[in-house]
Image (cartoon, helix red, strand yellow):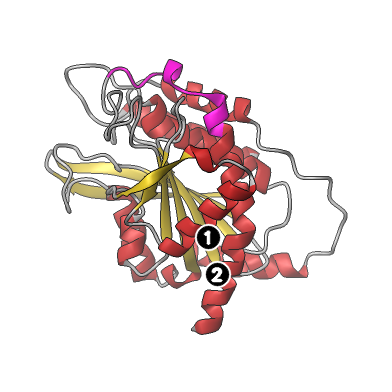
Amino acid sequence: MLLSWLVVLPLAAQSAPTTLLPAAPRFDAARAYEHVKRFVDFGPHPPGTAASRRVQEYLAKQLEAAGLRVELQRFTAATPLGEMEMTNIVGILAGEEPAALVLACHYDTKLFSTFTFVGANDGGSGVGVLLELARVLAAKPQRLTLLFVFFDGEEALRDFSSVDGLYGSRHFIEVGEEEGWLAAIKAAVILDLVGDRDLNLLREGFSSPALLGLFLESARRLRLEGFFSSRESSIQDDHLPFRRAGIPAVDLIDFSYGAATEPGPFWHTAEDTLDKLSLKSLKVVGELVLETLPAIELFVRQEAGRE
């Protein structure tokens, strides 16, 4: 059960002897891009497909190579197409404290029968950035326990609704409540559509204002504020189950994929391909997350002090 890793491993980390560690590696956008390329090479992989299982194996292998403990959350989802097997991939990086931060994306591609959808940006970019963040963050001790979660079934099988879509994140929250470990999760950061060449991250309206504010402040410090939109827009994404459970969550997403309009012209089309992505955008998002993590840690501590 995930609970054991949220409680036991962090305590063990506290008793480990102090050693001098080499400097942590820097976020490498080329590595992130290579993960996206592998994601695309697997081809379309909606839930329950053989290609989806190959993606799951790849994700687990990469997380284990980075030194993370990996758990597979297998579940059966009731969908408009009938019962469907889905799997969340959870990489666990034990910190000094049991309080946990979720860093997440979705890895499924939307099901289409009329064209080939590989989801280079819508799925792939978040996967690439998150796997590279796992490599970088695993190289040095962490105060908070970090959960790198790759959700299955974010995409609707027919039409997005309260019961069609967000299957993996909804299951994650439900199981956490049932098994009692959800209380350890203090915040969540969701990455989606973050590789667009013309990166324009939303000031997403359903996100926790406090967490979104921390990312905007990081963007100002790094002089990356130009990569955020000047206006607010609200998107239904994997942060919503966390918000409904009372957990602060933020969605880093560029929904104007390929244009100034929302949704952009490449969204959910055969044009969502590797040539639409930019290493610079992957790097901007990776560095924003790394820059903001200390502020999120402080935010978690302050919120805990109010409880």
Residue 166, compared with residue 108, is above or below; it is below
Q: Secondary structure at mark 2?
A: helix
Q: Is residue 60 visible?
A: no
Q: CA distance from mark 2 to mark 1?
A: 9 Å
The reply to whether discs 2 and 1 touch (Cβ–Cβ < 8 Å) is: yes
Q: Which residue is mark 2?
A: 300
Q: Which residue is mark 1?
A: 101
Instruction: Identify which residue, 298 or 142, lies in the foreground.
Output: 298
Q: Amino acid at mark 1?
A: Leu
**Residue 244 point in image, percent of width and height:** 30, 65
| Magenta residue check for 197 | no
Residue at coordinates 61% horizontally, 68% vertically from top-left? 298
The extreme front residue here reads 230
Q: Amino acid at mark 2?
A: Val
Residue at coordinates 56% horizontally, 82% vertically from top-left? 305
**Residue 88 point in image, percent of width and height:** 39, 47
Q: Is residue 285 left or right of residue 74?
A: right
Q: Which stretch did the figure color magenta? A: 270-282
Residue 142, compared with residue 148, is above or below; it is below
Q: Secondary structure at mark 1?
A: strand
Q: Residues within 10 Å of mark 1 (few under 14, many from 20)?
A: many
Q: Is residue 153 left or right of residue 26?
A: left
**Residue 134 point in image, percent of width and height:** 60, 44
Residue at coordinates 50% horizontally, 32% vertically from top-left? 58
Q: Is residue 117 left or right of residue 63?
A: left
Instruction: Identify which residue, 63 or 278, lies in the foreground.
Output: 278
